[in-house]
Image: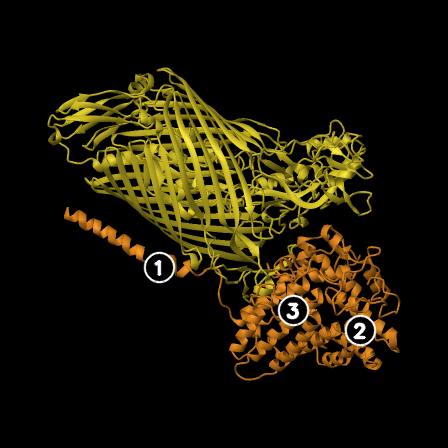
Chain colours: A orange, B yellow
Amino acid sequence: MHSRIRLAGLAGAMALVVACNSDNFLTGGELSTDPNRPTEATSGQLFVGIQAAVWAQLESDPARVTNLWAQQLLGTNIQYIDIYNYGVSEDVTNGFHASLYTGGGLVDIRRLEAQATAAHDSIFLGVGQVMEALLVGTGADMFGDLTYTHALTSEQNPPLDPQMAIYDSVQALLSRAIVNLAASGPTNVGPASADLAYGGDPTKWTELAHTLKARFLMHTAEVRPTVYPQVVTEASKGITNPADNFNAVFSGNSNEQNFWYQFDIVQRPGYIAPNPQFVALLKARKDPRLSAYFNSDQSDLNDSLIAPNHTQPLVTANEDLLLWAEAAQRSGDNATALAKLNQARALAGLPAESGLTGRPLLAEILIEEYIADFQSIEAWNLYKRTCTPNLAPVVAGAKIPARFLYDASERNTNTNIPAPTSQPARNANDPANTTSDATGAACLGQ
Amino acid sequence: MRSLRLSRHRLVTGALLVLASSRMFAQGATITGHVTGEGGVPLPGATVSIAGMGVGSITRNDGLYTFTVPANRVTGQVVTLNARRVGYTPQNAQVTLAAGTITHDFAMTATALQLEQVIVTGAGTSQVRERVGSTINTVDSTTLKRATQPQNILSSLSATTPNVRVNTQSGEPGASAFVMIRGATSVTGTNQPLIVVDNQPIDNTTMSTNGGDGSTVTQNRAADINPNDVESIQILKGSAASAIYGARAANGVILITTKHGTNGPTRYSITSTQTFDNVIKTFPLQQDFGQGSSGKPGGCSAPDCSASSLTWGPELTGGTPTFNHGKEIYDTGLTSDNAISVSGGTQRTTFFLSGGLTDQIGVMRGPNNRYDRTTVRLSASHQLLNTLTFGGNFSYFNTTGEYVQKGSNTSGLLLGALRTPPDFNNLPYLDPTSGLHRSYRFPNPTSASITDSRGYDNPFFVLNNSGNRSELGRFLGNVTANWVPTSWLSLNETFGADNYTDSRLEALPLTSSGDPVGNVTRFQITNLEVDHNLTATLSHEFSSDFNSRLVLGQNLNSRRNRQIFIFGDQLIAPSPLAIQNTVSYTPSEFRSLRHVAGYFTQAELDFYNQLHLTAGVRDDGFSTFGASHRTALYPKVDAAWTFTNLFGGANNGTGWLSNGRLRAAYGETGREPPVYATISALSTTSIFGSGFGDFIGSKQSGQGGVVTGSNLGNSNLRPERNREAEVGTDLGFFGQRSDFSFTYYNKRSSDVILPVPVNAAATGASTALVNGATVSNKGVELALNVRPYTSRNVDFSLGVNYAKNIGRVTSLIQGVQFIPYNNEGFTGAIGSSTVGFAPGVLRGQDFIRCGLGEQAALPGTGGAVVSVDSACGSGFKKGALYIAGSNNRPVVNPDEQVIADPNPHWTSGLNGSLRIGKLQFTTLLDIRRGGQVWDGTRSALDRFGTAAETDIRRDTAGIFGQNVLGNEAVAGPGAGKVAFRTLGDWQNWFTTTGGSASAVQSQFIEDGSFVKWRELSMIYTLDAPWVRSRLGLSSALIRIAGRNLHTWTKYKGLDPETNLGGSEFLTQGIDFFQNPQTRSFVVAVTLNR
C-alpha cells in the first residue's frame, strides 16, 4: 500500500511539474520564433532584396504597359489587348502601388538607412537614399499623390502628399545622398559586392544621383519651366558614359531572369509585338536600333533583349545626355543642345547632326529620347510631358492614359484614396498638352 | 441505425485484465459454455465474467467461452456469472463455484439502441452510450470493407453516417478522401477533422508536391492505416462531443480503435482480397470531325511543324480511322490485398500481431500508376501487478506509389488526351525516327526538338513518365499504463508518437509541354507528433440511484514538421530524373514546431439509472495562440434522459416503445491559428514581379537578399470558436425490431480567422490574419433501422440515414464580401468564401438574366445602361437568359457573382442486409441531392471541339433555349431566333463565349446530385464441423462483391464526386481533367483458425 501511495505521489508530482511549467512548454525556441524566416538582416542583404524589388518596379509590368501606351509595343493577347486599348483599371496597376512600400520597397530602404546610420556608414546611407528617391520618384510619376511623409507610421488612413511635394522631397533626398556619398572614413564602407550595379562605387552612385535629379526635375518642368538650368547642371554631373549606366543585372538562373525574357518567352508569349508605328519611325530614320530592338522581320523583340541573363539598363548615359540637350535647348543654348544630342546619337550608332536649331533641334532631341527610352517608363513620361511623338490614340476619341490607378487594396484600406472614378486623369506635374512640343501641331492624344 | 452497430471494446478487456489477478493452480474451476443470440446464432465477442472476482473470457467465433478460476479462490461460494455483448441485453446467472467444470449457456436478446455499448469518448475517456448526451456515431469494421477505395480508411466512411460527407478525389491509386462533418466552420484551410488512433492524434495532412490544381493525386495521410487493423470508428460530430479536444476539434474528431488481442487460444486469420477495377465512365467525345479550324484540316506533316490545337476541322469521311482518346488510356486495374493476423493471450498477457500487404495497380495503362502499402503491427498488454497493466501498440507503415500527372497541367494525362482530335493516332507516342515525343500539336518531331514544347503532352508520354513517386515510412506507436490503486480511482496514461518521412519525386522529362527543358522536384516531409495523455477517473456511488464520476486529465502534445523542397530546372541528360542532372536548383525548407498543453475535467452524474448529466471544460494552451491569448477555455454540458426507464429497468418500455431517450448538449470547440501567424518577420523567399508570372527572387547573382515579409504578424490572434447546441432523441420500437434517432444542431463559429489586406503605405505589409469572420451551420440528422424478420436461419435488416446541413458565412470583415481561394479553381470559376453562402462556393460570371431587376448596357443601347427587365419584354420566366444582338446570343454580365455551391442540399445513405443461413448479402446506396459542380473539362473540350456535344456543329439552326443551353428559359428580342447556322458560327461560339475561353463559366455549372450504388456483397461462411476436422480451420469466409456498381446522375462529365484538389481544397465541385472514379469487382477469402 505504501508503494502505491508513493507511486501515486510521484505521478501526481510529475503532472504538477509539467503543469507549472506549461508556459515553458508553450514558448521558447521554434515555438516562439519562426525558424523559416529571419528577423534581422545585414544592410547588404537588405540591399540585394531592395535592388530586386526596384528592378521589378521599373522593368516588369509598368515598363511593358507604358510601352503599350507610348505605342512602342502592340498588345496582342487577352489582357494586353485590353490595356493597349486603354482599358485602365485597378488591375492594370497589378500591385505596383503597394509594392512601393512593401518588402524590398520603402519599408526595407528605411530599415537599410537606419542600419547604415547606426553603423555610421554614410556611403551606404547615401546609396539607400538614391534608391528611395528612384522608387518614390517613379511612384509619383505613375500615381501622382502618394503617402510619403506619413508612410510606415502604422496610422489609420495615412494622408497622401501632393505629387509636386514628393518631387521636392526627392530632390532634397538626392541632395543629402550626394553629400553622404562623398563621405570618407573607416566606417563608410558602402554596399561593396552587394551592389550589383556599381560594385559599391560611390562615384557612380553620385553620378546616378545627379542624373535622377535631372530626370525628376524634368518631370516637373511642364509646370515649372524654371528648372531647365538646374537640369543642365545636374545632367552635366550625371551619367555620361554608358559604362556607368545603372542596370538591372540578371544571372539567368531560376528566379534571376530578365523580366522581358520571362514575359515574352516563358509566361506570355504572343502578348506583345513591336508596334508598327514605332517600327515605321525607326525605319524612316534608318535607325540601327531597329535591328537592335527587334528581330529581322519585326515580329518580336530582338533575341538579345529576351535572353534570361540580359542586362537591363534602367538609367542611362543616353537619357542623361538627352535631358541635358533638351534642357539646354529649352534654355536657349542650341550649341550645347546639339553637342549633347550628337553625343547621344554617337552612342546609338547614328551620325552627327549639324545645323539644327530651334524647334527642329528640340524635335530631334525629343524623338531621340523617345527611341532611347524604349523598354523604360521614361518613354511614356516623355510623351506625357511633351506630346512627342504626336501619337494618335488607338481608340478613336480616347485619350492616352496619363496615370495609373491606385491599387484596390490600398484604396480599400485608406479613406484618403478616392474611388477609381474620382481619381484624376492626369497628375499635377503633367497638364494635358494642347500642342506637340516637337512639331507645334495639335496634340492628338491628350 | 448503422452508427450504433456492434462494437466490442478493448476497455472491457482492459478492465478485466486489470481486475484479474492471482496465480494459477492445478485444481481450479473451469467455467465454460456457449453464448447465442437470436435464433441460436453463436455470438462471438461476448464477455462472460464473474462479477467481483475479475475473471472472465470472451467468446470465440463459435460462441464458446471458457475460463478458469484458481483453486485458492474456489470455496463453493455462489457467484454471479455475467454475460455482456454490445447490442444485447446483459444477462446474469447464479452458479456455485466448485472445482471441476461448470457449464452455463447464455441465450441473449438484442437491444435496439445498443445503449449499453461502451464507447470511446476521447482523450482517454469512455462511457456507456446511454449516458452520453452528445452525438457520437460508431462505424464498425464490417462496414469499413464497403469502401470505394478499400485502401483509404476515410473513403470507407462514405454514406455510413449522417452528415459525415466523404468525397474521394478519384479512382486513382493513392487518391485522397475529403471528409466534412456538419459543414465547414472556417474560411481558410480545408476543414478536415482531427484523426485519433487509439487515443493518440495522428497527422492527416494532404499536401501535393506542386499544388492541387496540377501535380498528381496525393494521399491524405490517414490513408496509411491498414483498414484490416481497425476494429471500430467513433465520430465525434458536435462540439459537445469533441470539446474534450479543445482547439483541435472544430471540424469534429474521428476516433479510430484498432484490434486488440484477447485471452484464450491463439487465433489466426488470413484474408486475401483481389479487386478488379475499371473506370466507370469516360468523357463522351465526338468521333466525327477532324483536327483543324473553320472546317479546314489543321494537321501538318513537315518536320517539327506545329499543328492546330483545335478539332474544328472537316467532317471525317467514312473509313477514316478514329480513336477514342478517353478510353484508350485505361485498362483493368488490379488490387491485391493480403492481411494476416495472429492474436491471443493469457489472463495477464494478450497480443495482436498483424501484417498487411496491399498492391494496387491502377486503371491507367503503363507502369507508373500504382500504390503499395506494407504494414506490420503489434498490440500487446501485460498485467504486471493486480492493479497495474502496461500495454503498447506499435505499427510500421511503408507506402510507395507511382503516379500520373493530372489536372490543369499541359503535361497532365487527360488534358492532352481529351483534347486530341479523333483522327489523330496517339500511338506510337514516340516518333519512330527521332525517338522523341510526338503529340497532335507536334506530330513530327526531329532530334532538334528535344527541348521544344509539344503544346499538350501525348497521354502515352504522360503515362510513361516514371518521374512521379512517393516513398513513405511511418511509425505509429504508443505505450499505455493503467493503474487502479483502489476501487474508486483509476489512472490511465497514453504516451505515443506518430513519425513519418514522405519522400517525393515529381519530374517532367525533356519535351514535356509543362516545361520542355525538363525539371525535377524533390520534396521531403518529415513529421513527428508526440502525445501524452493522462487521465484520472474517480467514481463514487452516493446511493444506488445516484452515481458519479469525475475525470481529470492532462494532455501535452508536440507536433514537429520538416519539409525540404528542391526544384531542379532544366535537365542536362535526358535521364536520370534526379536533381544532380539539372542545370540549376532552387531549394527551400519549412520547419515548424507546435505545442499544446491542455487540462480537462469532466463530471458525470447518473440519477435513478435514467438521467445522465455531464459537464466538462478543457483549458487549452497553444504555442500558436497570440501572446495575449495564450489559453482558451472550451466548456461543454450534456444531458441524456432515458425516459422509458421510468417504467422500470432497461428495455422495459411499454408496448411498442421499448426504449426512449432524449438528449441535449452544448459545447464549444476551436481551431488554432496557423503556425507562426503571430510573428512579423523578414523573408528570404519573397518574389517581385507582376501577376503575369514574371518575377525574380530576393536573392540575385549569388548574393543573398532579405526583405520584409508581406504578412503582418498578429500577436493578438486567438483560436476560432464554435458554439454548438444540439437536441435529439433515440427511440427503440417493438423490442429489437426498429430504432430511430433524430438530432438537430445549431453551430455558430466566431473569431474565424481570415486574411485581410492591410494598408501597405502605413505598414509595409500587404496582409494580416485577423479573427473576424462568422460562420453558421445548422442541420438535422435522422437514422432509421428496421429488422423486420430475424430467425435462426434468416435475418433481414434495412437502414436509412438522412442529413441536411445549411452552412452560411454570416460575415467576413467589414467591407469584405468574399475572399477568393486563388489556388482552388480558375479565373471564371474560382473557390471562395462569400457572405451568405457556405464556405467553398465558386465565383465567376454569368449571362444577363431577366427578372432580377438588373441594370446593364445591352446590345443596341450604344453603351447606355438600361433596365434589363424592360428589355426582356413581357411574359418571361424569372432568370431567363436575355437573348439579343445581331446573332441572337446571350449577353455577358460583367459582374462577378457566386455561380455554384458544391455543398449538397441533403445526403442520405441506405443499407440493407439479408442473411440466409451461412450466406449474407449486404448493400449500400450513397445518395446526394444538390451540390453543384463546375464541369471545366466540358468547358475546355467544347472549346477545342472534341466534346461529343460539339457534334451540334452539323446543326444549321442553333437556337438558345432549344438545342443550345436547352435547360435555360430565354427572353428578349432574340429569343427563339436562330443563332447558329454554319460550322463557323458554332466554332466562333465555342472558342469564345461558349467554351473555356469565356468569362461566363456559369454555363458549365451542373447539378452534382447522384445516387451511387456503393456496394453489393455476398459472404458465405463455412464453419461446418468438416472445416475444422478436415481443414483445421474454425471458419472460412468467401466474399464476392461489387463496388460502385452504378451511378445515377444527370452530371454530363466524368463523375460529380471527383474533385481536382481532393482533400487539399476546401472548394469541392471542381472538375478539370482529373481522373474518373472506378468500379470494382472483389473476391476475398478469409481463413480463421
Figure check: B268 above or below B818:
above
The residues tagged by marks 1 and 2 sit, at their Cα atoms, a distance apart of: 71 Å
Figure check: A91 above or below A143:
above
**As rendered, which of B838 and B37 lies closer to the eye?**
B838
Whether the residues at callouts 1 and 2 have beta carbons within 8 Å, the answer is no
Is residue B229 visible to the viewer in this orientation of the structure?
Answer: yes
Figure check: B41 above or below A268:
above
The residues tagged by marks 3 and 1 sit, at their Cα atoms, a distance apart of: 45 Å
Q: Position of residue A331 (x, y in %)?
A: 81, 80
Q: Position of residue B627 (x, y in %)?
A: 43, 59
User: Which chain is home to disc 2?
Assistant: A
Q: Position of residue B242 (x, y in %)?
A: 40, 42
Secondary structure of residue under mark 2: helix
Amino acid bearing label 1:
Asn
Q: Which residue lies under the disc numbered 1?
A: A24
Figure check: B96 above or below B992:
above
User: Which chain is home to disc 1?
Assistant: A
- Which dot marks residue A272? none
Please tell me which residue is depicted at 60% across the width and 53% down the height of the picture. B815
Q: Position of residue B191 (x, y in %)?
A: 49, 44
Q: How would you rate the neighbour count of disc 1 (Cα within 10 Å): few for under 14, some for 14-19, many for 20 or more?
A: few
Is residue B165 visible to the viewer in this orientation of the structure?
Answer: no
Secondary structure of residue under mark 1: helix
Q: Which residue lies under the disc numbered 2?
A: A345
Q: Which residue lies under the disc numbered 3?
A: A135
Q: Looking at this rendering, what residue extends furthest in the bottom direction?
A: A185
